[in-house]
Structure formats: C-alpha cells, structure tokens
Image (cartoon, coloured by chain):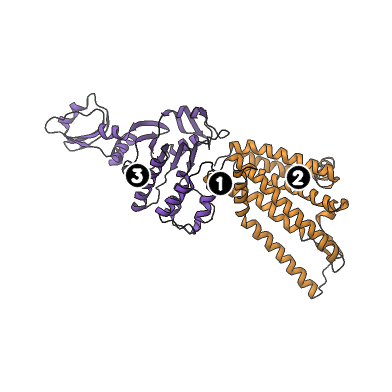
Amino acid sequence: MNKRVWAIAKLNLKNIKAAYFVTGLFFVLMIVEIIVETIWALEGDDNTGISLGWYLWTTVMLAAVLIPARNFKRVANLGGKRDDFRRGGLAVYAILSGATAFASTIVYYALDRTIFQGGKYGHTLSAPDIFGWAAHGAIAAFFQQFAFLLLLAMFIHTLTSIQDKWYGWAVDIALVAIISVFTPIAPLRSVLAGFFRIILFSPPSSQIAVCSTLVVALYALSKLIYARKAI
Amino acid sequence: MIEFDNVTKRYGGTTAIDSISLNVPNSGIYCLLGRNGAGKTTFMKLLAGHIAAADGVITVDGKRVSPSHMPERVNYVESGAAQFNMRVSDLIDAAAELQDGFDRGFALEMTARFELDPRKRYKRLSFGMKTMLTTIIALSNNTRVILLDEPTLGLDAIMRGQFNALLLESYSAHPRVIIISTHLIDEIAKVTERLIIINNGKVALEAGIDEVDEKAYTLSGSVNAILPLLDGLNCIGKSVEGSVMAAHIYDERITPPEGVALDRLSPQDFFINIVAGGKGDE
C-alpha cells in the first residue's frame, strides 16, 4: 500500500464517526438490556437472544455508505486521486471487516457460547451458528465472516457510488424486482436461495473463494464507476 | 500547455460549452469571466477531467484529459469546497500525504500569514477563512495548472485583498497556470495577466489585460460627431442620452477629433459590453 492510499484509508477511518457512534449506541443499549434482564431475572416470551456480534456489523455497513457518499468529494478537494480513493476504500473495508469479524468471533466464543447459552438465553442467534461458520473452528469462523463482510461492504459501496446516476436507480429497481419476483416463484426462489447458500452457507474454502472473487469483480467494476463519477 | 480543440459539453438539451477551441501556451494568472450560467464551471470541470466532453479533445501538456484520464497536473477547487471537519494543521498534513510534491512549508507559512489558527477545526472557521484555507491547500500543490472557481465569493474587501496577495505570493514561488473564475473583474485585474471571457458557452475573447487596457475605450460626444468615427471600429456597445452618445470600442486607439472625449474603459465595463452589448449599463 503506497503512502497516498494509506493516507486515504486513515482519512476514511477518522471520518466515519457516525458509523462508530451508531454501532457503539446499539452495542451499549444491548448490553444494558442484557444486564437489566440478568439483574432482575426478567423472563421474556421466549429464551432466544440475539448475539451482540450482529450489532458490530453496523460499522462496516455504514462505513460503506459514508465513504462513497460523503468522503469521496472531500478527498478530491484535498487533492486525492480517484484510483487512490478506490484502493484506500478497499483497504478500509478490509480493516473494518477484519476487526468486526475478529470482535464478533470473540463475542461468539466468549459470550454467546459460554455465558448466554448457559444462562437465561437457552439459544443465541449468532452469525457463526446460523451460517455454520463455527462448525470448522474459530479460525474458519473468522475468515468466513471476514470474507462475507468484505463482500457486503464492497456491494454497499458500489451501490452507493452509483446513486447519483440513472443506472444507480435502475440497479435499485432491478434489485427490488429480483427479490419481489424471485421470492414467490419456487424455481426462481431456489436460484436466489442457491446464491445466498454459496456466499453464506457453503464450506469455508468455497465460501471464501466465491466471496473473494465477487469482491475482486466489484472492485474492478468500481474502476469503471469512478472513472465516470463527477466530483 | 492547455489546449481545447472544438470541445462541446451538453447537459440534456442545454449546450453549456459550444465548440470551444482555446490554447493556453504559457504560465500566468488567467481570469475566466462570464455571466452566471455562461459555462465557466463547466469549462473548469472539463479541464480538470471531472466531467466528460460530448465532443472535442482537451489536452494538458499533450496528454488527453477525461474522467478516466484525470490529469495529475491539474488541480480544481470549487467555491465552498467541502472539507473534512479536522484541525487546520491536520488538513494540511493530509493534503501533504495525498499529493506528491505538496509544499507543506508554503502552506504553513501562508496559514500563519493569514492568521489561520492551526488548532481550529474546519467547521469553526469563518466562511472567508474556510475559503482561504482551501485556496492555500490548492496553491501549495505542485501541479502545473490550478483552477479556482469563484474563490472570492462571499469574501469581504480586506479578505479579497489578502486573497490577491496570496495568489501573487504563490505565483512568484511556483510559476504555473492559475485560472480564476470571478465576477469581481476590477479587483482581479490587478493581479491577472490575461482574460478569458466565456459567453453562452463560447469563448468571446482571450486577450492580455494590457491589451484590453490599451484597446478598450469609450468615445463620448454628440451623436453627429461619434457616428462617423464608428465606421471601421469594433464598437462593443453604445448608449444615447438625448443628443449625446457614448460608444464603447475594442480596437486600436484613435486620435479623437475636437468635441469627442476618449476615456479608458474599466475591465468591468469592458466585460459588460462584450457579453451584454452594454445592457448592464441600462
């Protein structure tokens, strides 16, 4: 990573405070709720809890909106180049996805499996359990989550980057149409489910390979998008 | 250095730039003039590679410019440019990291000269100070071409004077092409070397400020005395009050006959007459 790309990565990491704030707020509110329920031994309607790990994903998702929507122009006004911005963005998403996957994996093993599942929450809905990432050990769980989060970030980044163009709106409409048309029709639904099965539920090596390939494809696509993006 | 070859830019059905051909061969401070919506910002954004031309070719130092080939040698700064809400010193450091050859020493010297508190965050600065900081960052760049879009918009007279001083300071430290778009012609005329006037998407005039000073003048006197003199002269505007006429000329100077006065035409009045045929006087 050259000096300019790292400078853009640092600028982006410093200037997504809204993402950190919202994630922190969610996290604190959830912890307060858990503490209150634990101290007062409150019983809910069921004994299923939602893992704190999910809330950490907020940082990655909001960063992928704020960076192209807000930071692109500011980086350009400081003399940053488009290619450096794209590379710096990818670096930030890799850093945030890695940090989030790491923290989320820690939460899963330290809280979800040890504290909550033995206590009030008989079952905790956590990503490593739902998607089967924990089935192959902590390291695989980390890398599978990292690969998926990086793909999610690049997807949101790409989608946000084209919102000022007509084709951005066309893609939005196409996505809504795909989901609403594919879901009720069984053969199409299975196609949609198959796609999500590959990027979420498949074995570590294939899931990581597919997610990485899609990240590379989206990154290549962003070169075309940013080559035409008005500042 | 900069060449526009038959360049056109359209926004939907509107032609913002209409087959412009222009050559800027040398370093200097250029003033880009035009009415609101004349195409000044589009001209600058095309040159910076921020937007694509519909037709024609733009080159900087022989290299073709487009959004996919943004020239590293051109730095465009729009009026009211958004910046990260960071401390002044941190913004300068960030710009120094982003740009190869950024003159950090010059930037810090200028922030001290213009009393910009390096510890203040961007949003805490006054409007004028924000503009000054953005201009300092742009001028500290080592690029061959700097485009400043309405940099003095909203600045008071003292700040505008400081801005002009900054411009000259920067130019003497790093001679290059600096193009400034503005409406305050008389003030910028003190520091600029050439004028580029755009009207309805076309280049109406490209000339040195000395040339304009020499060739732009007003002949005033009785209608009967003035009218015969206009034959063969490039009259860019005229007004008649009763039997007295004032004719604005852009041509070689003549020796006026008795009863006809020849006065210098200010850059502001020259501009009004060139783009609006003197309608701004009415």
Q: Earlier in the sequence, mark 3 or mark 1?
A: 1
A70 relative to B232 in the view: left or right:
right
- Please tell me how crowded label 3 is: few (under 14), some (14-19), or many (20+) other residues with Cα within 10 Å: some
Q: Which mark is residue B75?
A: none
Mark 3: which secondary structure? loop
What residue does disc 1 label?
B97
Q: Name the residue: 77% across, 68% down.
A: A34
**Location of residue B70 (image quadrant):** top right
User: Residue A213: image x %, image y %?
Assistant: 76, 39
Chain letter of disc 1?
A: B
State which mark lies toward you, 1 or 2. 1
What residue does disc 2 label?
A179
What is chain A's hue in the picture?
Answer: orange
The three-letter code of the residue at mark 2 reads Ile
Contact? badges 1 and 2 (CB < 8 Å): no
Chain letter of disc 3?
A: B
Direction front: furthest residue: B105
User: Residue B194: image x %, image y %?
Assistant: 35, 35
**Location of residue B149 (image quadrant):** top left
What is chain B's hue in the picture?
Answer: purple
Q: Nearer the viewer, residue B279 or B25?
A: B25
State which mark lies toward you, 3 or 1. 1
What residue does disc 3 label?
B184
- Distance from disc 3 to disc 1, alpha carbons, whole Å, reads 34 Å
Q: Nearer the viewer, residue B269 or A96?
A: A96
User: Residue B148: image x %, image y %?
Assistant: 44, 42
- Please tell me how crowded label 1 is: few (under 14), some (14-19), or many (20+) other residues with Cα within 10 Å: many
Which quadrant: the C terminus of chain B?
Answer: top left
- Distance from disc 2 to disc 3, alpha carbons, whole Å, reads 55 Å
